[in-house]
Amino acid sequence: MSDRARPRIYFLHGLLATSYAHFGEQLVRWRESHDVVPIDLPGHGRSRLDAAAPYYARCEALLRRYLDERGPGHVLGVSYLGATVALRTTLADPTGVQSLVLSGYVPNAPHAVVTRWTHSFHLLAERDPELVRHYERVHGPRWRQTLDCVLAEIRESYPASVAVSDAQLAELAVPTLVLNGSYKSDERETAARLPSLGPQIEAGILPGAGHIPSHDQPELFSGIVEAFWARLQQSSVARPRIRDLVPRDEVADARAPGGLR
């Protein structure tokens, strides 16, 4: 099957990672059946673009260019970089976005929490020379500039450039699946709460997964995403919710950590 005939998937990684690092299992699993498009965001991996302000807007413009030039597809984004870019791009213009899958994500996390989380990358690098060598291998010496650029934007314009409100989420016009891990309480609470904002949003909590569920529980993550895509092809009258498509012996009750909603 030619790329033109195959469904397309765009992948957006988290901070100081690549799509191959965060979605490696999915890229291998889906590359025969889909046109997989792993995007390295500015300042990351093999991207020819360096990080520059306004960083998030530049990333959103990059994804929009891919959608316009390569064509419609499903968009997967992880964490406060990839998921944010995927969601904000879609809110600005849903053209070409067939569905959203967001993971490791709290759309309106407190400003101080996201600032501390981003700054922690500097602290970890100061304590771990091997981590610095890894960043150098993957991103080159520009990784510090990239981190500083992202941190500056989060500090200075988080509400306008990064955070997404409940009111904005309620306006989503694209089928959206949020898959968070069971280890972090704020991510569990987000997955439990977001479906109440509208019928276009579904969410799941993956047992045994941390901040990057696609990496921590790749089989379960991939299976749920595939079920989500499959049900989008069914009649909107008859299609079941995601929680009904997942074997009950694989997950806990929806009210407990690890459940699906």
Image (cartoon, rainbow, N blue to C red):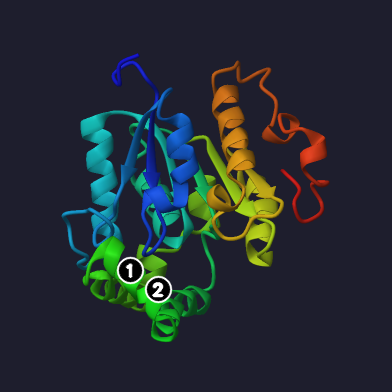
Q: In the figure, 117 relative to 64: above or below?
A: below
- SS class of the residue under badge 1? helix
Alpha-carbon neighbours of circle 1 within 10 Å: few (<14), some, or many (≥20)?
Answer: many
Q: What is the quadrant of residue 56 in the picture?
A: bottom left
Q: Please give the residue where the numbered disc 1 appears in the rendered image.
A: 135
Horizontal side of 261 relative to 105 (left or right) equals right
The three-letter code of the residue at mark 2 reads Leu
Whole-number angstrom distance, CA of label 1 to CA of label 2:
6 Å
Q: Quadrant of the C terminus?
A: top right
x and y percentages locating residue 23 in the rendered image: 46, 46
The quarter in which the N terminus is drawn is top left
Residue visible at 52% across and 63% down? Answer: 108
User: Which residue appears at 38% of the width and 80% of the height?
Assistant: 129
Q: Residue at x 69, y 60 (%)?
A: 189
Q: Does dot 2 land on a helix, a strand or a loop?
A: helix
Question: Mark 2 highlights which residue?
Answer: 131
Of 113 and 9, the residue lying toward us: 9
Amino acid at pointer 1? Tyr
